[in-house]
Amino acid sequence: MSFRETLAAARTTNRSLLCVGLDPRLGLDDVLLFNRAIIDATSDLVCAYKPNAAFYEASGSEGWRILRQTIAAVPDAIPVILDGKRGDIPNSAAAYAAAAFDELGADAITVSPYMGGDALRPFLARPDRAAFVLCRTSNPGAADLQDLDVGGEPLYLRVAQLAMEWGAEHGNSGLVVGAADPAALRAVRARCPTLPILVPGIGAQGGDLEASLAAGLDAGGAGLLITASRSVLYASQGPDFADAARAAAMRLRDAINAALPPFDPP
């Protein structure tokens, strides 16, 4: 199946728009054991997982091994989005895509649009994979570039339009829009009615869940991947961390569902 099909199936089966970030703290005694416990505890509550490559790359070759095995530990029915924020000239981008999709086994990857469409083409060339384009992020410096006026609209809306066009052949592009700015999320959804949007910033980062859902849901009452990492992974610092993670994920999944229109699986 394509990424979009796998995502839709996971959403329906688990009744979930929740994406859990697998971002282990540096210095954990056994990162792989921790990740597997989190996955085992939450895989029936999520629509996707999102490991951030930086937390693994910082540990060198061992981190790369753990990342590969973490992705392999995710059930096949749940898609994995590698948060790598890649973006380079085409031949380098092709190598990044091969690393993410073939070496690591990810189903999708986050990418930077700054170098333009040819730099993202290798990530979008495979119909069974997907790329989520950074659009309007939540970091304090985001406005330095993303809010610049381009022909009477902010640059992030131009990026949203381009991302839709770049992925049109295979229908496999998505966007990253942070929860900190529901107005931007609403504008992006209006521009791109059908694209999946990854929404980080809920949970420990304090994003407004209900405002994000109201702004970003598509016409079918879906289209969002609400991402939480620390608030789920570290719901407990003790030996009950997996049980606490499950409870936190369930609370957030249920809070999302409570704010949705009636759920009617296709």
Image (cartoon, helix red, strand yellow):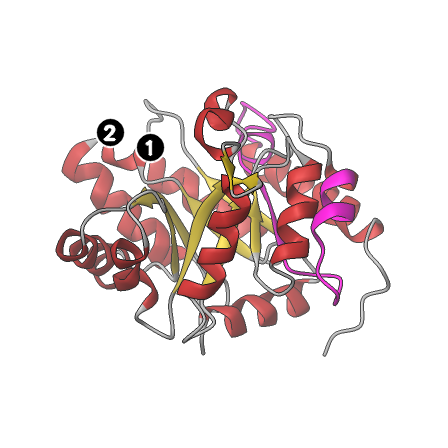
Residue 127 is situated, as x and y percent measured from the top left of the image, at 37, 75
Q: CA distance from mark 1 to mark 2?
A: 6 Å
Q: Are marks 1 and 2 in contact (CB under 8 Å)?
A: yes
| Quadrant of the rendered image containing residue 232 | top right
Secondary element under disc 2, as helix, strand or loop, is loop
Residue 169, compared with residue 234, is above or below; it is below
Residue 255 is situated, as x and y percent measured from the top left of the image, at 78, 44
- Relative placement, left or right, of 258 versus 164 is right
Secondary element under disc 1, as helix, strand or loop, is helix
Residue 218 is situated, as x and y percent measured from the top left of the image, at 70, 61
Can I make out residue 81 in this image? yes
Range drawn in magenta = 211-240
Pick the quarter of the image with the N terminus. bottom left
Residue 126, compared with residue 260, is above or below; it is below
Is 35 or 158 nearer to us in this picture?
Answer: 158
Residue 170, compared with residue 243, is above or below; it is below
Judging by the rendered image, the residue that carries numbered circle 1 is 55
Instruction: Name the amino acid, label 2.
Output: Ala
Residue 126, compared with residue 206, is above or below; it is below
Query: What is the crowding at mark 2: few (fewer than 14 residues within 10 Å), some, or many (at least 20)?
Result: few
Judging by the rendered image, the residue that carries numbered circle 2 is 58
Q: At x 15% / y 52%, what residue is drawn? A: 92
Q: At x 67% / y 57%, what residue is drawn? A: 16
Is 148 or 33 nearer to us in this picture?
Answer: 148
Instruction: Name the amino acid, label 1.
Output: Phe
Pick the quarter of the image with the C terminus. bottom right
- Relative placement, left or right, of 98 versus 131 is left
